[in-house]
Image: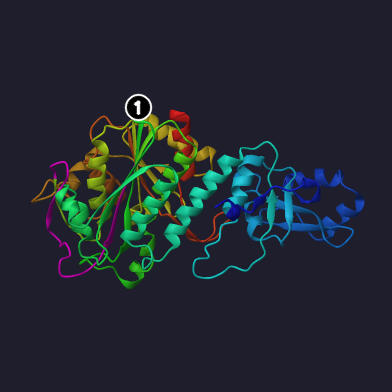
Amino acid sequence: MTERLQIIDADPASAVPITVLAESELEGWLQSQPAGAAAWVKAQGFKGKAGEVLALPGANGAPARVLAGRAAEAADIWRIAGLAASLPEGTYRLEGGAAPQPAALGWALGAYRFERYKADKRPRPKLVWPVGIDRAEVARLAGAIHRARDLVNTPAGDMGPSALAAAVEDVGRAHGARVTITAGDDLLAQGFRAIHAVGRAAADPPRLADLVWGDAAKPKVTLVGKGVCFDTGGLDLKTASGMQMMKKDMGGAATALGLAEAIMAAQLPVRLRLLIPAVENAVSGNAYRPLDVIPGRNGKTIEIGNTDAEGRVILSDALVEGSREKPALMLDFATLTGAARVALGPELPALFANDDALGDALLRHGRAADDPMWRLPLWPGYRGLVEGETADLTNAPEGGMAGAITAALFLEAFVEKGISWAHFDTYAWNQKARPGRPKGGEALLLRACYAMIKERFA
């Protein structure tokens, strides 16, 4: 995995320096340079604006230095991230303008390419490892995010429930975790009736992947990820345009798996559990139907108001199972509602938390890591909206108002009282390319959650 980061051991003296400058810093820097270099920069019209890049020629015609402009408020992690995809082939080193640890991680994230089906033959610039940074931390975070992106970017034909469960097994095997896969009708035998109901119509049977790692005496941290590998909408069928991007409906599972991988690679002192219900919401003669009632794992019954609100249904089983051990912390990740995207857009996941201290810590780490989120309320006045007519709960309240909040309130009904819990409604996708964040699958929240867990339990 580390070769994908495009960061190498090499003699820094042989590498082309990269200097990052804001517009306000350019004039002072030019005054410290030889007259010829300053004249070249001015002649090329380089102003130090965000996204500007200028190579200063050396004696042999090769670049002697690269100048990169940045917005004054730009986070360190993204200051050279775009260069990993835009510089000519060669070896480079960071020389000022960005803190080296986050800059190296940003470079590694910018080096990501998805090449499973089509080779990317663009040049591959390489960065020399900055001195004095935690290389292992860079490698494990970048590797976890690369893995999550790969999973989301893989089409559903190659990333169905069995493939997603196999990915959990692969990660678990690499870190000595115990992984149990419960599939098909075995889900019914073990009481996971909601997962089975949603996934039973697919040719690839539904599964629950359950990974356990670490010392049982350590604080218990449980991660849950929505693994809807493709969402047709079920019998409440989506339109063609609504279905187009549904390979990414397992983005919550990919994020949770990437976070679990980072935690295990860092050997954080926790007893980790990862629960991923993996299904395809398909259409066939045995598909679950509107107004079906599904018995929940904690005894609460679920009335199906809409088969296209399936994510919260499968998460209900996983949250009850996760609550059983009364973990010190439980986080769930899901590409759950269009309402969250209408409210916050694709770049800002919605955070819901039943614990203000946890919510505050997540927001703080999100700001520090430039991995942001925005907290929405578990508004108690809306709990009546998720009450069913013929069952305890409905998965699709009428009216459509406060859709992200009512989805979170539905999930809260399956979290045991007293457990510190947060729910993330994430898009898991970059709509457009930005430095370090290519268009496609994305592990939003992973870095912020990792930092919070590391601070809380290390």
The residue most toward the bottom is 240
Of residues 75 and 139, the one nearer the viewer is 139
Amino acid residing under circle 1:
Ala
Does residue 250 lie above or below 455 as drawn?
below
Would you say residue 396 is visible in this rendering?
Answer: no
Does residue 289 belong to the magenta stretch? Answer: yes
Of residues 154 and 237, the one nearer the viewer is 154
* Residue placed under numbered mark 1 in the picture: 217
Local crowd size for mark 1, using a 10 Å CA cut-off: few (<14), some (14–19), many (≥20): few
Circle 1 sits in a helix, a strand or a loop, which is it? loop
Q: Position of residue 323 (x, y in %)?
A: 25, 37
Does residue 352 belong to the magenta stretch? Answer: no
| Left or right: where 447 falls relative to 376 | right
| Left or right: where 406 falls relative to 88 | left
Q: How many marks?
A: 1
Q: Residue at x 60, y 56 (%)?
A: 111
Q: Position of residue 440 (x, y in %)?
A: 48, 61
Q: Position of residue 109 (x, y in %)?
A: 57, 52
Q: Quadrant of residue 327?
A: top left
Does residue 311 lie above or below 273 as drawn?
below
The residue most toward the right is 35
Q: Position of residue 94 (x, y in %)?
A: 72, 46
Would you say residue 109 is visible in this rendering?
Answer: yes
Does residue 372 lie above or below 220 as drawn?
below
Q: Quadrant of residue 453?
A: top left
The residue most toward the left is 390
Residue range corresponding to the magenta coloring: 274-300
Q: Residue at x 52, y 49 (%)?
A: 143
Of residues 98 and 454, the one nearer the viewer is 454
Q: Residue at x 66, y 41 (%)?
A: 100
| Left or right: where 264 falls relative to 311 | right
